[in-house]
Image (spheres, rainbow, N blue to C red):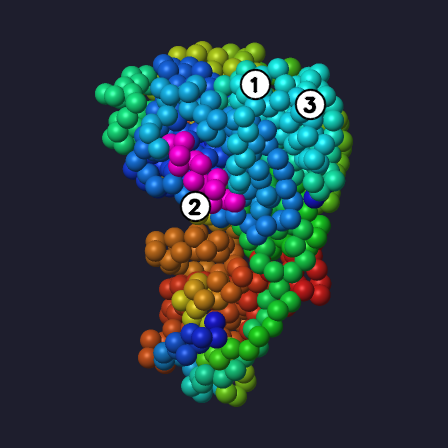
Amino acid sequence: MKSESGDVRAEGWICAKCGVALELLPADATYMGSSFQVDLPRCPVCGLTFIPPDLAEGKMLEVEKLLEDK
Amino acid sequence: MEQALLHDLESRCTQEEAPACRSMCPLHVDGRDFARFMGEGRFDEARAVLERFMPLAGLCAFLCQGECMPHCRRAETDTGVNLPMLERACALHSRPGKAMPLPASGKSATLAGSGLSSLCLAFELGKKGCKVKIVHTGEAGQALAARASDLLPRGALSGAMERLLALRVSFERVDDFSPDLCATLLRENKILYLGLDDPALDFRLSAFGLEHPGDPLTLETAIPGIFAGGAGISFIKAAAAGRRAAGSITRFMQGVSPSSARAGEEVYPTKLFTDLSRVLPVPPVEAADPKTPTLAEAAAEAARCIQCSCLACVEKCAWMARYGAYPKRYAREIYNTLAMKVGHRRANAQINSCTLCGLCAAVCPNGADMGRFCAEARKEMVSSRHMPASAHEFALEDMVYSNSPEVAFYRHQPGHERCRYALFPGCRLPASLPEQTGKLYAFLARNLEGGVGFFFRCCSMPAKWSGRPLLTASCAAGLRETWEEAGRPELILACPACALFFSAELAEIPIKSLWETLAALPLPDTARALDGVLALHDPCTARDRPDLAEAARSLALRLGQKTEDLPLSRGFTRCCGYGGLSLFANPEVGAEISRSRLGDTDKDLLCWCVMCRESLRSAGMRALHFLDLLFPGEKDPAVRPAPGISTRQENALAFRRAMLQNFWNEEDEVAGMEPAIFSMDGEVAEKLEARRILRSDVEKVLLHSKEKGAQFRNPQSGRILSCLRPKQVTFWVEYSENADGSFTVHNAYCHRMRVPGTPGEGLPTAVILEGFDPQGGRV
Ligand code: SF4
Ligand code: SF4
Ligand code: SF4
Ligand SMILES: [Zn+2]
């Protein structure tokens, strides 16, 4: 997830609550007891994290599978 | 996992056993590898096989007289593969290997006689760095040269002598093995071998103080350190005796008993199973000049080798084929994965992809059951908290839904205080064929004496398949409770998976299959046969129930329905892919297993398990269920699509509602079944199906978003993207709100990883709590 996090874009989406554009910011992702930091589009005000479909079904799924088999 | 289980499976799988040519060859030359290389024109590699298994291969290759040939499996069809001819061709036309002696070991041995056994012994000891001296009369190897003159080409013997010299073997020529010389040799050598295949040693045993030659296996004589043998046996047996003597002498030098650990050194019949049913006769290839076969002739003969191997199970099962090996290897890999403390648990996905169908055990000559092994492995994964939640969570939640008070129910037949029977259709039949199930119930209620109750719930097989014994037991207990409250009726089971579950987990409940029950009743008036022949697909869960397979066939017969058996049927039937939750844990492998049936027939399939019908239909086959014949509905039932995950659940609820209304005149007090609050196009619906997102999951996100506020907005498109984590899965829904307050869903997806800001507790659902690790969030 880390290496390709630069590709993650939130074209056109803004935080609905704060009304601001999203920025690539470090976020803690956790699964199966493992936790790691990754740059993801987030609301700079409230911290909400944006996950686009290709990330959920691509790199993220891959990492989930890896962690499940650890 | 218990090691005994691993050993049991390992001992049953014979795939790693030697082919017959190898086990019956005195030198255990791997004829299978050798013939393969020869057949493929890889002559140097073929030569390397000979060098590996034959001492002095450049000599022995000419002396083999084909002792394996009568045992070659091809001999059961025509004649054995002519390995001697192959060996000859190989030795004539390829370069000899290099023997690399180990550094001098400081050990030494003396060999009397220069027959083949002595030469091979010298070669073997010499390679190990032992200082070998051969005492002989005449020219060294003279007697062998004379005996084998018609076999040995020029240069074969001298080549062997050169190799021995390169191994620092020394030769001492004597005039005669006189009694004096024998006594001296005996006195001066702690280790002495008497090569009795050299006629110079004929009648000399007593001169060495011996009455008998050595033990046929170890060549040990009555005197420690003196070994003897080689007389009166074939060349290759003498070569093997020389090599075994080397093993004995090495042990003796190390102070180990020469007879220790010698298993498999003599010839033995192999346990390797090889299916010969498809082997066609091929006439043997004769060399134009038998003394000098060409490589082309040898390659042609090599092609007659059938490359003996078992893989009977691998041929039949897509799971087996997919991971590139066979049960013995799989069992070891799985065992090792289970034993791992840290690191990549390679076999996890594999363990969860097996359908537990038992076809492997049925086709294996020794009954090796990979399914049972994987089932045990799953239990172990659960108890050691290594079972990923993603594998079975969806299927288990689906099961819990079927067993919830909102869906499950029991009722006596209207007008009865108690019932002798109850129809237990299972969870899937009513969800797939709701109307027919209702008609079936009415038919049974009308035709059976003593009252027929109706019992709707899931048998809970998914709990068992997922490797969760506690969940299985608690689900079974819930079922038992309802059954007891119902007055313990005999259950009529429509689903063979239920039958399997009941006999294993609820043995006290009397059960009867629907198919047996129908056999004793008249046919429903509506029953009809279809034109043409249908192929009967038997469910794997009834593999051990020939009576049920028979009942299904006699029902077809009574219906006047022409059917035929599939190539793999009854006890040897294929799993439809649904078994063992394989389709849930690994949709790709599950679908591959489902598709295995595609090649078996071009007929429509007739199923008596509804799960089979749905899985095979989803795999693209035309398939119908017996109820489609007994209570016909649509015109072409073989193409009815299998209901998707959401439709199934909605159907179950609607079925309950309709049953309660039609038979018991009850208004269902259970809420739900609100009209859908959103719409989507077919493509989005397909995505939901593939991603195992229920329409109710989408609704949860939409309602949450509407109530608590959306997460993201796209000012250009006006769309909203909201997420919610109601359990250990985060669902995302991209939608727009229509003027009338309804929603149009454009996309939905999910992931299990947690990121900051997502609303929702994200707690694991109760069903997967067995084996749940609160620390790691691991299940
Ligand atoms: S059928 Fe399969 S398990 Fe049985 S011996 Fe052959 S390869 Fe091994
Ligand atoms: S067919 Fe080939 S592998 Fe099988 S026994 Fe004969 S030579 Fe060996
Ligand atoms: S899918 Fe069936 S045949 Fe294949 S390994 Fe599993 S139990 Fe055996
Ligand atoms: Zn915000």
Q: How many marks?
A: 3
- Which amino acid type is marked by label 1? Ala
Does residue A42 lie above or below B482 as drawn?
below
Does residue B335 lie above or below B237 as drawn?
below
Residue shown at 65% from the left, 60% from the top:
B342
Q: Are marks 2 and 3 in contact (CB under 8 Å)?
A: no
Q: Which residues are magenta?
A: B156-168
**In this rendering, which labeled residue sits more in front, label 2 or label 1?**
1
Q: Position of residue B231 (x, y in %)?
A: 56, 18
Chain letter of mark 2 equals B
- Mark 3, secondary structure of its residue: helix
Magenta-drawn stretch, dominant element (helix, strand or loop): helix
Camera-side residue: B111 or A48?
A: B111
Residue shown at 40% from the left, 63% from the top:
B747
Residue B161 inside the magenta-drawn segment: yes
Distance from the alpha carbon under mark 3 to that under mark 1: 16 Å
- Which amino acid type is marked by label 3? Phe
Residue B44 falls left or right of residue A30: left
- Mark 1, secondary structure of its residue: loop
Q: Earlier in the sequence, mark 3 or mark 1?
A: 3
Residue B664 inside the magenta-drawn segment: no
Are tags 2 and 1 found on a single chain?
A: yes
Camera-side residue: B324 or B455?
A: B324
